[in-house]
Image: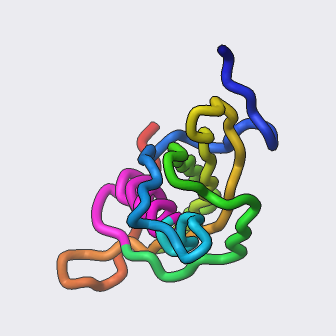
């Protein structure tokens, strides 16, 4: 059976993939938004470290929109795309999608833009190297 997609196609590169577990639920049985946010921050951080070629810290999360709930058993896939790189900071667009448990349907569940700053070993901002060509 082929996978069905609701909401278009993911934007960016698949960066993190995990499964939603019962321990991550709220009183309604849905997965906590904070758990989804943390998975998105992990994915954005991975992309940030790769682009900055070193340590980064999260300084902002903008325009986070929850579209659909995540349920126990859903496979969460997080996609990332660098939108802008400044001297020491970068904005990374992050989308979270789920493949519904046993239904083989893929849906976008949330989007956000994260801002990361590259830091040195002392925790001070440092320049982000140019992209190697």
Which image quarter holds the N terminus?
Answer: top right
Question: Is 18 located above or below residue 42 in the figure?
Answer: above
Question: Is 61 located above or below residue 83 in the figure?
Answer: below
> Which residue is the extreme one toward the right?
7
Q: Which residues are magenta?
A: 36-56
Based on the picture, tell me whether residue 42 belongs to the magenta stretch.
Answer: yes
Number of numbered callouts drawn: 0
Q: Is residue 110 visible?
A: no
Q: Is residue 10 visible?
A: yes
> Which residue is the extreme one toward the top?
1
Report the residue at 44% width, 76% height from top.
Answer: 58
What secondary structure is the magenta-colored segment mainly?
A: helix
Report the residue at 32% width, 76% height from top.
Answer: 119
- Given residues 73 and 98, the one toward you in this image is 73
- Given residues 119 and 131, the one toward you in this image is 119
> Is 29 left or right of 121, judged from the image as shown?
right
Residue 112: x, y in percent? Answer: 65, 66
Question: Is 38 located above or below residue 70 in the figure?
Answer: below
Q: How is the image coloured?
A: rainbow
Residue 95: x, y in percent? Answer: 63, 54
Residue 32: x, y in percent? Answer: 53, 71
Report the residue at 26% width, 83% height from top.
Answer: 123
Question: Is 17 located above or below residue 31 in the figure?
Answer: above
Based on the picture, tell me whether residue 7 belongs to the magenta stretch.
Answer: no
- Given residues 107 and 112, the one toward you in this image is 107
Residue 8: x, y in percent? Answer: 80, 38
Instruction: Residue 33: name its quadrant.
Output: bottom right
């Amino acid at each position: 059976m082929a996978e069905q997609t609701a909401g278009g196609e993911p934007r960016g590169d698949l960066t993190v993939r995990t499964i939603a577990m019962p321990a991550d639920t709220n009183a309604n049985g849905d997965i906590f938004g904070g758990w989804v946010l943390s998975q998105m921050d992990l994915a954005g951080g991975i992309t940030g470290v790769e682009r900055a070629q070193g340590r980064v810290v999260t300084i902002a999360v903008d325009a986070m929109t929850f579209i659909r709930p995540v349920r126990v058993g859903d496979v969460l896939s997080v996609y990332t795309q660098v939108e802008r790189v400044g001297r020491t900071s970068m904005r990374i667009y992050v989308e979270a999608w789920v493949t519904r448990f046993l239904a083989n349907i893929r849906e976008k569940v949330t989007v956000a833009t994260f801002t990361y700053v590259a830091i040195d070993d002392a925790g001070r901002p440092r320049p982000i190297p140019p992209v190697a060509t």
